[in-house]
Amino acid sequence: MTHRELKFDILRLLQNSKLVDDSRLSQRHIGAKIHQYRADGIQKRYELKGEIEPIWLQNLGTPAVKTRTTTTSTVAATTSSETARKIPITIETITTPAKSYVEFTKINSADDPLVQGCDCILGKLRIPEIVSLPGSKGSTHDKGIYRVSMASRQIPYHPTTINRFYGFVHGSHRSMQNYYWKIGNDLYIHPYKKKGNIILILDNPLDAGITQDDPYPISYTLVEFIIMKLLTQDFNIEAKMAADAKNDAADTMIAMQQKLRSYNEDR
């Protein structure tokens, strides 16, 4: 299911419910709320289950490349009086790069005031806003950054903070490991490598470079959560009436579930 499909399915459900004045429905508003309430729903699901669902994850880097080729095919004659003819056929293929990667900028203390006091070479990358999922108590790992690794994906970077990194004794076993930390929306890695692989849970999935017509990383549980939030919070519908409206739109809900199931099977 794409973001565009989800947006229009929800708009149709709201219109058919007769609980919302059509003049209050806006594609832009619904589209933005899908991102917002998806992020809220992920945080609530994580607090409840303590697990990361694979459908939430996105690879930050080179997206799949969609190409279209038009060719011709000969159609045989069906009667003695008809001649064979050629018709154009459009073939669409999606090519996923073998390795998606991002490129880090090489910096040192002269380039960035936040890394003063370190004579090391670091990699730096500005990343989009993530859905923050704090790790266990005392952990430095925000699981909204699911994994950072070298471009091969075989060698990971481990989460830390800049202060802990500075505190590692030079030459010790810990100082020889690969680390990353985040300050604001800037991600730093050590040791520096030009290319890397990053898997995130994004606040706005479109920030990964996908479009409204690409598969949107969402589960059916989150779709239900978004619909209920829209009805109860944005349009002030009582929870019971909102639930009834969702149940009355069974055909639309089943169609959305089927689209999501098809996408999940293709992942």
Image (spheres, rainbow, N blue to C red):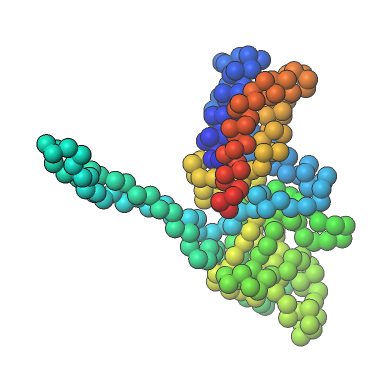
Q: Quadrant of residue 247?
A: top right
Residue displayed at 67% across by 53% down: 54
Image spot of residue 223 (x, y percent)? 66, 35
**Between residues 44 and 266, which one lies in front from this camera angle?**
266
Q: Residue at x 31, y 51 (%)?
A: 69
* Above or below, 144 relative to 219: below
Q: Is residue 156 left or right of residue 165?
A: left
Residue 19 x %, y %: 66, 15
- Residue extending farthest to the left is 81
- Where residue 130 sits in the image (x, y, percent)? 67, 50
On screen, 58 above or below 149? above
Please report the residue visible at 22 percent of the width from the left and 45 percent of the height from the top: 75
Quadrant of residue 250 in the image? top right
Using residue 168 as the reference point, say whether residue 188 is left or right of it: left
Q: Which quadrant holds the N terminus?
A: top right
Can you give x and y, in whole percent of width and height, for residue 265 in the image? 59, 49
